[in-house]
Amino acid sequence: MRHRSFALLWSGQTISSLGDSLYRVALAWWVLEKTGSATAMGTVLIFSMTPMLIFLLLGGVAVDRLPRIRLMLGSDALRGIVSGAVAAMAFANVLEVWHIYVASILFGFVDAFFQPAYVATVPEITPRESLNSANALTSLSRQLTGTVGPAIGATIVALGGTPLAFALDSASFFLSALCLLPIPPLAPPRADAPASERRSLVRDLREGLQAVLANPWLWVTITLAALGNVTSGGPLAVALPFLIKNTLNANVGLLGLSGSLISLGQVLGSIWLGRIARLRRRGLIAYGGLLASGVAVLLYVLPGGIPGIAVGALIFGASLAAFGLIWTSTLQEMVPSALLGRVSSIDYLGSFVLLPIGYGLAGWATDLVGAPMVFIVGGIGTVVLALLGLAHPAIRGLD
């Protein structure tokens, strides 16, 4: 936080992340009141995720061709306008479900550009010795806003209604843009390349993919992270409510407790690792975190109950923070600035592309064999993925 440009960038994104938390709670409640349909809510999520997946690679190319601060400024402004339009229609009582679908598509499209730009900008405005701390602060802000945001959003919806929450989300994007304005403009990494050296879109994408495939740490980790979203993300997102209700005969409070403890574990893990200026044996720590996350998934059912879920959630959150922080730092160190936007977009695409499949498999398996078995298979699968990664010398040898 001693570095002014990063402090401004971080402050703006913390504000907009809090606004996102308010929006998600208000959106879920509005869809429930408007339609009473879980299918409608699922469709909203699909409409927001699909454009992001489709345009991520294009976003990565844009990040490496255009000024990154200006790209984020435009993204914040567009998101502020879209959420402001949603708020205005909600206040006028003319908001319809199809409006939300259109807004979700626009949000997903803009996120495909904003996320790679943020990852690529941090190492440009932060000295190398502070990069670990900067990434830890980014993770910390997301987890803190993810923890307190839903409670604040629920209170706002209860007192002022969903239109007010939509309006505050819109304001958060404009405040984020104001934080970006004082940051000195950064020239695009390839701005000085002569016209004869500028490549086509396909060649740009190929160059980013080649950078990933040339580095075993990158392609092995992206591949295993994609599979890990199936083995651990599926049970926690889909099977957990059924485990709590049908197996433990508990109420929704235990589901909320699990989410809060995961966030708390991530906060604690981010603070602990963020204090270390230079981590050693990062490959072993990162994949040790992945292995621990598999054990944490097993703890939800072995021994299970409230203690098992509480301990499992804390361990899962802390291990997720360790893995994510080391991955972001190594990505920023290993990949040249001129390629970082494209490689970041490939990372996002690889990490999320199997997530819908994981949700579908977890739902099908929960109905077929029950939630406890889904957790057992998912936990064992995550442990196996970690051990497969550790079998590669490039993973074990990363210092």
Image (cartoon, grey):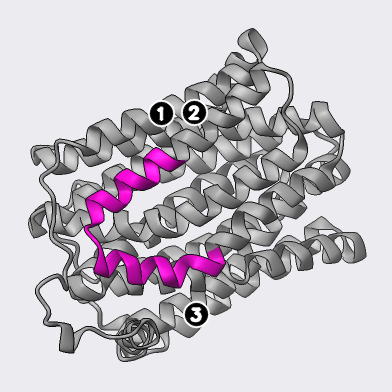
Q: Where does the N terminus fall, quadrant-wise?
A: top left
- Secondary element at tag 2: helix
The residue that disc 2 covers is: 169
Quadrant position of residue 391 = bottom left
Which residue: 26% across, 61% down?
120
Q: Position of residue 214 (x, y in %)?
A: 31, 91
- Of tags 2 and 3, which is closer to the observer? 2
Q: Position of residue 2 (x, y in %)?
A: 8, 37
Residue 148 seen in render: no
Q: Is residue 322 left or right of residue 31?
A: left
Q: Where does the C terminus fall, quadrant-wise?
A: bottom left
Up/down of 162 relative to 378, above or below: above
Which residue: 58% across, 71% down?
353
Which sits in the foreground, 230 or 396? 230
Quadrant position of residue 179 = top left
Q: Position of residue 224 (x, y in %)?
A: 50, 77
| Disc with the residue nearer the chain's start (2 vs 3) | 2
Which residue: 35% across, 61% down?
116
| Disc with the residue nearer the chain's start (3 vs 1) | 1
The residue that disc 3 covers is: 223
CB within 8 Å, label 1 to label 2:
yes
Please rate how many residues cluster around mark 2, counting C-alpha atoms within 10 Å: few if below 14, some from 14 to 19, many from 20: many
Q: How many marks?
A: 3
Magenta extent = 53-78
Tag of residue 172: 1
Up/down of 192 relative to 320, above or below: below
